[in-house]
Amino acid sequence: MPTPPYRRIADDLRRRILDGDLPPGAVVPSENVLVEQYEVAAETARRALAVLAAEGLTEARRGSGTRVRSFRPILRQAGRRLSAEQWGSGRSVWQADLDQRPMAVDSASVDQRPCPGRIAGALGLEEGAPVWVRDRRYLVEGAPVMLATSYLPAEMVAGSAITRLDSGPGGTYARLAELGWAPTDFREQVRVRMPLPEEALALALGAGTPVVLIARFAFARDGVPVEVNEMTLDASRYLMEWEFPA
Amino acid sequence: MPTPPYRRIADDLRRRILDGDLPPGAVVPSENVLVEQYEVAAETARRALAVLAAEGLTEARRGSGTRVRSFRPILRQAGRRLSAEQWGSGRSVWQADLDQRPMAVDSASVDQRPCPGRIAGALGLEEGAPVWVRDRRYLVEGAPVMLATSYLPAEMVAGSAITRLDSGPGGTYARLAELGWAPTDFREQVRVRMPLPEEALALALGAGTPVVLIARFAFARDGVPVEVNEMTLDASRYLMEWEFPA
DNA sequence: TCCCGCTAGTTCCTTAGGGAAGTCAACGCC
DNA sequence: GGCGTTGACTTCCCTAAGGAACTAGCGGGA
């Protein structure tokens, strides 16, 4: 059972990419070139390139060519506890581009809606109970990198700035604190999968790019849930970090 | 610019899967059936099915057929702080199969090797300094779900059970504690991408299945790094959870 | 100098046809 | 009844050919 030609071609190209022979940004040999070099049909060469695209290694632009993708992650730090000097924040196996690139909000909306079922349980509400829903899309350098939707019980936040587009200085959590519901603990649940078409569209994802789904639960004193935040991240743009005691 | 046929077919099937019309385990219409129903060439029907496979929604077995994949995640809890009764452990937007399925170790090895560059910095060692390397593969119900490689400074652990296959009751961290290097804090850095062929092989991954890379740093008192653990998880089998204070 | 149109090169998509390799169940034989 | 074989069905792979959609650069004209 010899490995089929399209796979051998893909293996060759992958090795050249991982070895640095084809560095990020470099143009990968075109379909026509591969047809000549390997003496295969056009479909076969095309399949080989499709494999690399599906692995997230390359990015094809019609009419232009196929290029090696680059990886410049954004560092997302949650539960930051350890001081940088002592615990060596620079200690990483992946050299993240730690340059703090500013994050902008692109499209935002704030609505009061009936609570979806999967959220209701987490917030301790009945399904359909009124919740305020804050919807946003975050950009870095003009490109979308994250979608976020947070849900807050309407009874808890009615009348506050949380129900307005601009939630004011310090954001939602500062307003919750003023209302006597300062978050004290967080739980984040994380799933990873390939994106649905709508998600791929909203985040402008290339082929072979997974998404990270983070469901963040914020709790106030006595374990009262005050917010659920569902985030969808472009996996190719994030390096995530959590810190916690033994 | 009308959407091409193969994409329309894929959209139809995807909708049927997400609507529950085609539940997990159900057989997806075969290539031949799609050729008849949609009146397209075989390659086109094949492409449509390839889209769903690349999205991780289906799994094809040659000679048998294509079936809808199911998602039965393993819950991985890190930094567990909140008590279950008070903080509602059941509160999740994804109903994880919380049944604790036992985890087995499949192939393991323990070696002393020179420290790779990317690890050396994190452990505060020179590149090439001797480290003990513990390599393992974890199975759940006979299927591989995670690879793990941990690195410990040889000077620190020489002579202890950490250098043997069976590290004894309580594992590596218990031995570290006995040596006076009890871990007190952890940092986990997480990346997500599509697997390399070797990773796909070692974890028996289907198409459209990303991997989660976790680099875990363990620190003892005064911020002394004692271990780096690089893990590779089958993303389709894990629901990860982190807890931390505000 | 600037802008427009052309052109060569690129990826993307489809049809038609052939064959290899694996699975599964029904059938016939012992 | 049990067992092996056969055949229908399935996914997988390749070739050949053609056309659509898009891009970047070049050259000519105002």
Image: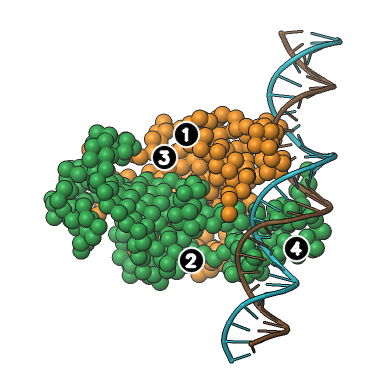
Chain colours: A orange, B green, C brown, D cyan
Q: Element at badge 2?
A: loop
Residues packed near mark 4 inside 10 Å, few (<14), some (14 to 19) or many (20 plus): few
Q: Is residue A76 above or below residue B234?
A: above
Judge whether residue B107 can be spotted in this image.
yes
Check disc 4 and give the amino acid type.
Answer: Asn
Identify the residue under disc 4.
B32
Identify the residue under disc 1.
A19
Q: Chain of mark 2?
A: B
The answer to whether dots 2 and 1 both sit on one chain is no
Check disc 1 and give the amino acid type.
Answer: Asp
Q: Element at badge 3?
A: strand
Alpha carbon separation for disc pair 3 and 4 = 47 Å
Between B246 and A231, the one lying in front of the other is A231
Between B1 and A36, the one lying in front of the other is A36
Check disc 2 and give the amino acid type.
Answer: Arg
Between B80 and B102, the one lying in front of the other is B102
Check disc 3 and give the amino acid type.
Answer: Leu
Identify the residue under disc 3.
A75
Q: Quadrant of the C terminus of chain A?
A: bottom left
- In front: label 3 or label 4: 4
- Dot 2 or dot 4: first in sequence order is 4
Identify the residue under disc 2.
B72
Label count reads 4
